[in-house]
Amino acid sequence: MLVNADFHVHSCFSSASSKDMLIENMAPKSKLKGLQLLGTGDAFHPGWLNIIEESTIYSGDGIYTAGDVDFVLTTEVEGKNRIHHLIIIPNIEIARELSRKLVSKNKNTDGRPRTRYAGAELLEMVKEYDCLIGPAHAFTPWTGMYKSYDSIYDCYGKKPDFVELGLSADTDMADTVSELKDFPFMSNSDAHSPWPHRLGREFNVLELKDISYSSIKHAIKHREIKANYGLLPNLGKYHMTACTKCYKIIDPDIARENKMRCSCGGIIKKGVDFRISEIADYAEPRHPNFRPEYVHLMPLAELISTVYDKGVTTKTVQGIWQKLIDGFGNEINVLINSPINEIERIDSNVAPAIEAFRDKAIDVVPGGGGQYGHVSFDKPAEKRKVAKITTLDNF
């Protein structure tokens, strides 16, 4: 069976997360998105584990069910060098045991615990309990594994189970790095709120025998991720090298000459695009035979917002979004599967935008420095790629 899964989210206990990140909200919103399987996030937080137990029915073999949505226990841990690691956990008993073992001052107050453990130490600790582990948003400049290491093996000592790409990278970018040829790639949302334009903005399609921890583990170990869906990487907020204060995109060589300081006084952050070019072994991606298709998409509400030039949560955007969901069942169906002529009957302005995304006929102003990129639908496909911007004027 093919299952749409998003393994990386956060609960109401994580800093900068919505107070509405509760199972009772996450489950119905995931269903509207078109997800069947969701990570719980924050599974080392004792209070969140209590809420999971109270809000779900244990379906066996590591699966906790609410409504028509299944949950598997996951957590993100911030380790040595501020590197973030994603962990998938077999059950609540193991989650509680690992939480007790983890040396962390904030594990009872923040859903994402901080520890001084290096990647290799975390790997060894969780492997004793049959968990899965890999780098979260591996290339991002603040907390990605590759911001501190040139090799994944320098971080973990041995091979972890997967690599999460993050919102600012995709398969084409990651498959220029030769050491990643044997790894399954994950595309997850890292959602901090239950809105469908956050949950499942990136997700995976897995081939599972059934929905269980054993099947999830088998699929990841045997590289049975059948598709990755996610943002165009240059829509990600750390795709290009840019200032974190004024968000100006700056040529990396110019940035280094100026000691990563912008003329406005802000800090310049190295972009994912440039970081991957530093560690890449190939000029063009070399996809291994098992590598699935990576399909670019954009959250439906954000797409509607772009078309109508109104805020994502406005009545106009949410009203159109709801009509499309009512018509086609869930957001993934609207974005990927539904015939354009049928979408056009509901909204003749949004249909061409969805078609342009499917045809890769869009223009992107890239993101960087913590600001997301944005799209327009004015240019044909052959002009959609935006060249790197070199900014010399204020130095």
Image (spheres, helix red, strand yellow):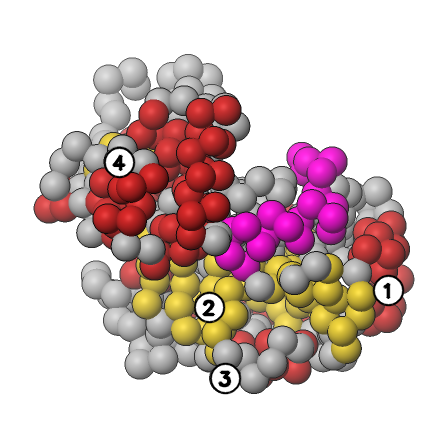
* Mark nearer the N terminus (2 vs 4): 2
Mark 3–mark 1 CB contact (< 8 Å): no
Q: Are marks 1 and 4 in contact (CB under 8 Å)?
A: no
Q: Earlier in the sequence, mark 3 or mark 1?
A: 1
Q: Nearer the viewer, residue 310 or 103?
A: 310
Q: Nearer the viewer, mark 1 or mark 4?
A: 4
Three-letter code, disc 4? Ser
Q: Earlier in the sequence, mark 3 or mark 4?
A: 3
- Residues packed near mark 1 inside 10 Å, few (<14), some (14 to 19) or many (20 plus): some
Disc 2 to disc 4: CB gap under 8 Å = no
Q: Separation of disc 2 and disc 4 at Cα?
A: 29 Å
Q: Position of residue 225 (x, y in %)?
A: 45, 73
Classify 365 as above or below 161: above
- According to the image, label 1 marks what residue? 96
Query: Is 81 displayed left or right of 375 in the figure?
Result: right
Q: Earlier in the sequence, mark 3 or mark 2?
A: 2
Q: Is residue 33 inside the magenta stretch?
A: yes
- Which residue is at a point 42% across and 43% down the rendered structure image? 324
